[in-house]
Amino acid sequence: MVAPPDGPAPHSHAAVALSLLCYCSCSIWMILLNKLVVDTFKLDYPMGLIFIQNGCALLLVLGAKQAGLIHFPEFDAKVAKRWLPLTVLFVLMLWTSMKSLKTMSVAVQTICKNVAIVLTAFGDAYFFKKQLNSSMFGAFGLIVLGSYLGSASDKWVTTEGMLWTGANVVTTVMYVLYMNDLLKHVSKDIGRYGPVFYNNLLSLPFLFLPSCLTLRSLLTDIKAAPWTGIGCLVAMVLVGSVMTFTTFWCMSVTSPTTYSVTGALNKIPLAFLGIFIFSHYPTAMGYFGIASSLGGGAWYAYLNRPKPKPSVIDLEDGGAQGTAKVEAPFPTGDTDSRWWVVTTRDRGDDL
């Protein structure tokens, strides 16, 4: 007889696919809207814009909780203390991304940020014992080579932009890896939507003073902006608020590598949308670099595709119990999960 599993049910393919789709959509439009607002419509106030985004996201999660749509525990000072380093990385990641977009084309910034996939994978291997193979190193080579060729031949690349992009890559990798480790320790205490609450709440004090210093200028420029600019600003705030939910939802059903590899897929339409929307057409070498970097990212995503998971179940034969391996598909997008072992003594899961 098969012992019934206890604990939470594994994530279905549909849940994983939907979380990735929502995260990709928000991620693509977040970058394009940021570029439009900061560069095209000259509302270059990163801290103020992030303050508005995070404030709206906090109001959204509190309103959803009040309406009974979601639930998370009340504020806990001990959890907040552990969450504070992640919040600092969160603010730095958003700030450096906006600063980078101001002085870079979307396509080149996209492929340069693809390097975060490589660094995250190495961090995943070092801290979480993720296995890497020769095929993955081949994909890494394409990503790095493509990023170099694309940026070296692009006339919109600036030294300042490359410095901001490099800083964004570093903070993104640190954010993803630290988040994965932190959620293993506090996820049971804060639930699925607790991270959204803590991330946005704790970020506001860091953003408040810089926002106040530029608030008057921001309001003046918003009043002078065309309706299309105001519309993009409103859309950016809404997408940024929703993206916080999709980020933590995606992280809750995938591994840090799967989460970062998602960028290898959403960066393909993002890069080409950026080329056509902003008329930043690369050279032939630039196209080759973009194709190489995005191809390497897509190849790595393929290498990390979900695979069937074998389970170990208990069998009862004539009153005596034993164990047998049964090859069965495990419906989850988390390619880093170990076997889920079901026994009469214990059930261990490592997401």
Image (tube, rainbow, N blue to C red):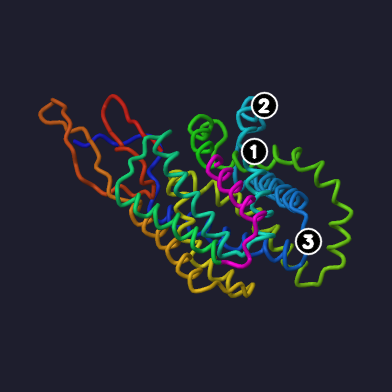
**Of pointers 2 and 3, the one earlier in the residue sequence:** 3
Q: Nearer the viewer, residue 29 or 196?
A: 29
Span highlighted in magenta in the image:
154-175
What label does residue 87 carry, if any?
1
Main SS class of the magenta portion in the image: helix
2 vs 3, front mark: 3
**Of pointers 2 and 1, the one earlier in the residue sequence:** 2
What label does residue 77 carry, if any?
2
Percent across and percent down for residue 215 are 86, 51
Answer above or below: position of 320 versus 120.
above
**Of pointers 3 and 1, the one earlier in the residue sequence:** 3
What residue is drawn where x is 55% and y is 52%?
Answer: 246
Q: Which residue is mark 3?
A: 43
Percent across and percent down for residue 4 are 29, 36
Element class at badge 3: loop
Element class at badge 2: helix
What residue is drawn where x is 68% and y is 58%?
Answer: 238
Q: Mark 2–mark 1 contact, CB under 8 Å? A: no
